[in-house]
Amino acid sequence: MNEALLDVQDLRVYFPVFQGFVQRILGGGDVKVHAVDGVSFSIAEGEVFGLVGESGCGKSTIAKTLVGLVRATSGRIRFREEDITHPGPKALFHVRERIQLIYQDAHAALSPAMTVGEAIADVLRTHGLATESGERVPPKSEDELRQAVYRIFDDVGLRPPVFYYDKYPDELSGGQKQRVVAGRVLALRPELIVADEPVAMLDMSVRARMLEFLLELKAKYNLTYLFITHDLATAKFMCDRIAIMYLGRIVEMGPARTIYADPKHPYTRALLQAIPIPDPERRTKKVLPRGEVPNAIWPPAGCRFHPRCPVALATCGWEGRDVIALLEERWLSPELAEREALAGPVEEWEAEGLLARRDVGKSDPAPVQVLMQRIVQETGGPLADAIRAIRVEGSAIVVEFRAPDPLVPQEVEGRVVECLLY
Amino acid sequence: MESKGLSVTFDTPDGPVHAVTDVDLTIEKGTTVGLVGESGCGKSTLGRAILRLLPENARISGTVRFDGIDLSTRSPKEMRDLRGRNIAMIFQDPMTRLNPLMRIRDHFIETIQAHDPGVTTDEAVSRALRVLADVRVPADRMNMYPHELSGGMRQRIMIALCLLFKPALLIADEPTTALDVILEAQILQLLQSIMHGYNMAVLLITHNLGLVAEFADRVAVMYAGRIAEEGATVPLFREPYHPYTQGLLRSVIDLDTTKLYSVPGAPPSLLGDSVGCPFYPRCEKRMAVCETVFPEIRPVGEDRRKVACHLY
Amino acid sequence: MAVGTARGRTTILGRFVGRPAGRLFAHFLKESGTAAGIIVWIGIGIVLAIIVMAIFAPFLAPFDPNTKVADPETAPGGRFVMGVDRSGQDVLSRIIWGARIPLAIIAVATTISLAIGLPIGLLSGFVGGRLDRILVLVMDSIYAFPGLLLAIVIAAIIGRGILNISVAIAIVYIPTYFRIIRNHVAAVKQEPYVEAAIALGMPRRRIILRYVLPNVAQSIPVIFSVNAADSVLTEAGLTFLGLGLPPGIPDWGFDISLNWQRFEASWWATFYPGLFILILTTALTFVGEGLNDILNPLLRKKDFKAKVEA
């Protein structure tokens, strides 16, 4: 059993939203982007751990937090038993010698005014050269430094090293730049490398080469990877264990083989289904989730995926916002919108947590109540089941939802899922 | 749409760059053609060449016929009318393609009135609403600014803007590359339903072979500015003839991949003139003749397959 | 760490400015044939010619500029190519000698502006926060004043003398350097490679000097030239108003102030100094604008190439 190299407990990273002066006075309260909202996982030494999800799910934020570019709002990060959640400057300097980051865009990660040789040399100058015993010593001469850089170029497959030393980033191809970035990171001899979409910007026909290269490096230097991607197919090939993220939380996590063989969480299933298969003879009808990923400032209640989930239950977290979204979608059809204009327009509805309210002013609320009841009945499904009552309160119609069941990660058939279906 | 011998060369300070060379491409009414290739192969340039949306330093030669009309004989004014009305184009990044200073409804009004000056604002708005319903965008988005909307919504609005005049051809240049996989699938489903509803032909330009397999009736594979292989989707995927197509299909990483494969080498520079087959340095099946003589594209086998390779 | 700093300032400067500057220079030479390149060369040529003229004034000027050599207000012709002014001095000689003051003042003023504006701009742009806000406020306030007016006020306060005028002018132009550098730095700071450098544990000072500054340095020659052009006018304005110079030293602006009232009688004494001010300003502007045309497309082209390749 391998010792856990990295252990993350209930990590939360929130970013403040820039609010205009007026909004701050009127709106009140601190509005935050819940980029990472309670994530826990651990990585064993020597494994490739995949963090998979779409953009905005928080995976890149986790990457930056681990390397100290972003500050964790709460939670705990431990590297080999040492707490590195909020490192001081000196501690941070040493953390960076153990955890490093490979970027998606290799070109952007290199300063255009510096040769690639210089870029690596600079790192060695700052941190010193690594010795056999694992210590770091300052280089004794320019020549020793240069030789060290040549060795690194050699290691990453940029041969002859002398040729590449004086090249500027814009003189190299995408794959070569990615190797330089890898070399620069390796100069620090890290133990854990966070690779943030390392092949997303490379052409299909060369991706395999880069992935093989990453695996070679792993074998050669005993590395552990946190492999971040949105591409489930690549993740399946590369990773030992994966965690699927949605809107700041992990929805399913476990050994890759287990999850791919039998995905449990509806979101995982949706992701797998959505991947276009390059085989025209296997065209399948896809059942896709509705809508898009909501913004992370006001995540949906309960299970965040519930508004889009094709198999949601009544207890998954339905709330005021959902009935308003229902009306909006319903009234996309102009005929329905006209017929049911009594209950509209959508802008007149307000959501407050489990309630949705529409004030009818001087008109009679009773017909609106009846109309809403009919609409809900027609719609059916978990949303309808989740409504406790549609009642009149003064001059307003109020739709009230039942409170959702608490959502806890469960262990199911060898992996962890956060879903009320289990 | 039918192109013959279409070539596009850019005059750059470093010399002429042959982005597209000698392309014969046919798109039949109501069908989807997938134009596949990797970055720098010229597929985007080809898409733009059809609409003559190229920068000043581009020189186009060859013919492009649309609905029987030779587009090179059209005046700039006629081309402008054609664009949006008969041929529409959607682009890769919906974030930057909408004017941030204009509300959505103004985008529609402007587009409609540009082609039909007589249309009143109210008429334009109702036409816009109808099209928005087709792409499943709620009406209240009309009064918003682009930055207030999500990426998927923006892409749908772009599609809606294209549908206003029921164009016969829609050129989609990497429409989903910047989008996540679920959104991509949704947009593609949308496009499929629209295609049938509007009887529209689509030229789907992408580097994603999966999309092409799901979506296209015919596929054209581009390499270094030329068409390497073209044919009906199912036979082409089942049995690719051109070594590049074979390499490309082998290197795709999908859920069934157990072994990684890359095509060795890198695409050639399109600067200056070249001789022989552009794939020669990377081809596993190369022969002596491939180095010096360019293989013209010719029909091979059935299903109107065409391949540019000396092996056939 | 020790290796880098042990070598002394000049080498560090050479190392981080040297190579990229070398490439820029090579590109610049390559672009010489273009319209922008020609303009730059013309500008440089003229400026150099004027500098040479100033240096070799004792050998080039036919007469002593402060001595009466002929009847006042003699028209141009014969021995007096540009005529004679109202004090009987040869205009040509005064033009030749008069180049020294403007050039000296410009050189000192722009150097001071750069030496102060650049580091403050770098710091402000990179550090941000309250310091940045305060500095921007201060600089914008200075910038809001019309240049000449501000220079007059400062010169009036600190008194006469070549150095004092230089300082006055320098202060007027510091905000320009500051703003442009600061904005450029704030933009570069967002770039992924700066973030990468931070992630690699680079100390702040190193990041500013080696990752930010070289990528910002391209704007400097342009600001420098354009500022210099503007300073010429400001300097001429100051000396015209009689501020700053000890009397008796030839200076184009000063000469205009001496002779403009006699324009109808001896237009040449006013015209030629004015013409040369114009020439020097225009030449410096050519250099600045031409450099701008050459260097900025270079940056854009590099970005374009990278995106196409990816």
Image (cartoon, rainbow, N blue to C red):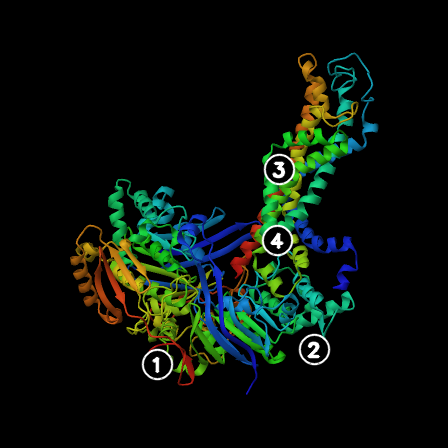
Residue B14, visible in the rendered structure: no
Q: Earlier in the sequence, mark 2 or mark 1?
A: 2
Mark carried by residue A134: 2
Tags 2 and 3 on a common chain: no
Name the residue beneath numbered marker 1: A422
Specify whether C207 is left or right of B68.
right
Indicate the secondary structure of the residue bearing disc 4: helix
User: Looking at the image, can residue A112 be seen?
Assistant: yes
| Residue closest to the eye, A105 or B230 | A105
Labels 1 & 3 near each other (Cβ < 8 A): no
Q: Amino acid at mark 3?
A: Ile
Q: Chain of mark 2?
A: A
Q: Which mark is residue C142?
A: 3
Which element type, helix, strand or loop, lies under badge 3?
A: helix
Where residue C155 sits: x, y (%)? Answer: 71, 30
Amino acid type indicated by mark 1? Tyr
